[in-house]
Amino acid sequence: MLKNFPRKRKIFRISEMKEFEDLKARLDVGCSEQSDSSVAFTYDADLNYAFQQISESEHLADKILKCKESFLNGVGDESYINSGFESIGSRIQKDCTKNNQLQSCRGADRDAFRYEALSASQKLELSRFCWKAFSKKRSNVLFNWVGCFQSKGRVGGGKTINYKVFDIIKSLEERATNTRFIFRYEPDKSGAIKIANSLHENRSIDANRVDVFVLANALKNYIREHLDGLVPIEVFEKIKGCIRMNDRYTREALFSYIPFVFCDVERSLLMALFGLLKKVSDNFEQTEMSIDSLLGLFSLVLHPQAAFTTLDDLEYVQMITKELYNLDFGGLPQAVVVHELVFV
């Protein structure tokens, strides 16, 4: 089937991907059969392993016992018998060491196929593939070529984000996690707009001296007004169409692609923002802000203004934001890695 691909650009070795896929399947089966505690599972595995070693060494043990009896009767060499017992112990110890090394290698193989472990060219190819899933298909050849050119220009680029926004998030992590109604209460809107404009114009900001409510609303204003959200309009429209058509499988596949349409700065900003919201919701007794309330507020911030055309779009952006919050931004989609990105 691989000969049907007109262009072949190898990204991952097929043998590695098949081995990784088989290993993941075996680990999933092992986890499903696991008992209530991992200790009990380890004990059962060691017990079965011990029985296996004993059954394999029965003939050797019988031979050594016979030699022991002959030695007691005055015939035989004791050093040969002791070496036999030592060979059994060393053999079991060697096999146990090999088994432990195999378990550690399994964990390393699982971590090897994370987004952070990819090279720059692999990240670019992954982003290009994921963007193709959200691009519109045009019947006109000229429009199709123009759309392809625009998507290539979008891959590897992204929005111009001031890195000082991460200092604001860090300051909010220290002060906002025990502030009541943070991100909801807006006492000084003009002050928040001024801070957001300063951030956009790359002027110096001492985040620790700014009021925590003003700083929180300035973060929302900067993402909404100056970045026009972080979720591309193509992603919103494609997911919205899947929700309307109730196409669950395509929707799940597209959601697994979303983390890889962002550039590295956008990914870092989203992950830092979601981490901040999680800390605020974890301290619900002090903040009185649940994660659902926070995601509802930021659903109006993370999506572009072009996404809000009807009242129904408010429900769609909330659903997409909640799904986006629960995504794993480091785990590569298995279907993408194994089947799609081997040859493109």
Image (cartoon, rainbow, N blue to C red):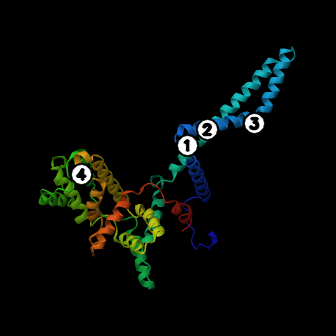
Front-lying residue, 278 or 285 = 285
Type of amino acid at the residue the image marks with label 1: Ser
Q: Which class describes the residues within 10 Å of circle 2: few (<14), some (14-19), or many (20+)?
A: some
Tell me what residue is drawn at x 27 percent, y 46 percent.
283
| Residue on which disc 4 sits | 168
* The quarter of the displayed image where residue 102 is located: top right
Type of amino acid at the residue the image marks with label 3: Glu
In three-dimensional space, the C-alpha distance between marks 1 and 4, rounded to whole angstroms, equals 45 Å
In the image, taking residue 113 as reference, residue 229 lies left or right, namely left
Q: Percent from the top left, x then y, of residue 31? A: 55, 48
| Residue on which disc 1 sits | 35
Location of the C terminus by quadrant is: bottom right
Tell me what residue is drawn at x 64 percent, y 38 percent.
98
In three-dimensional space, the C-alpha distance between marks 3 and 1, rounded to whole angstroms, equals 27 Å
In three-dimensional space, the C-alpha distance between marks 4 and 2, rounded to whole angstroms, equals 51 Å
Q: Which class describes the residues within 10 Å of circle 4: few (<14), some (14-19), or many (20+)?
A: many
Residue 244 vs 59, above or below: the answer is below
Q: Label 3: state its secondary structure.
A: helix
Q: Percent from the top left, x then y, of residue 113? A: 51, 53
Disc number lying in front (4 or 3): 3
Residue 285 vs 1, above or below: the answer is above
Residue 56's disc is 3
Going from N to C along the chain, the mark reached first, 1 or 2, is 1
Pointer 1 and pointer 2: residues touching (CB < 8 Å)? Answer: yes
In the image, taking residue 310 as reference, residue 69 lies left or right, namely right
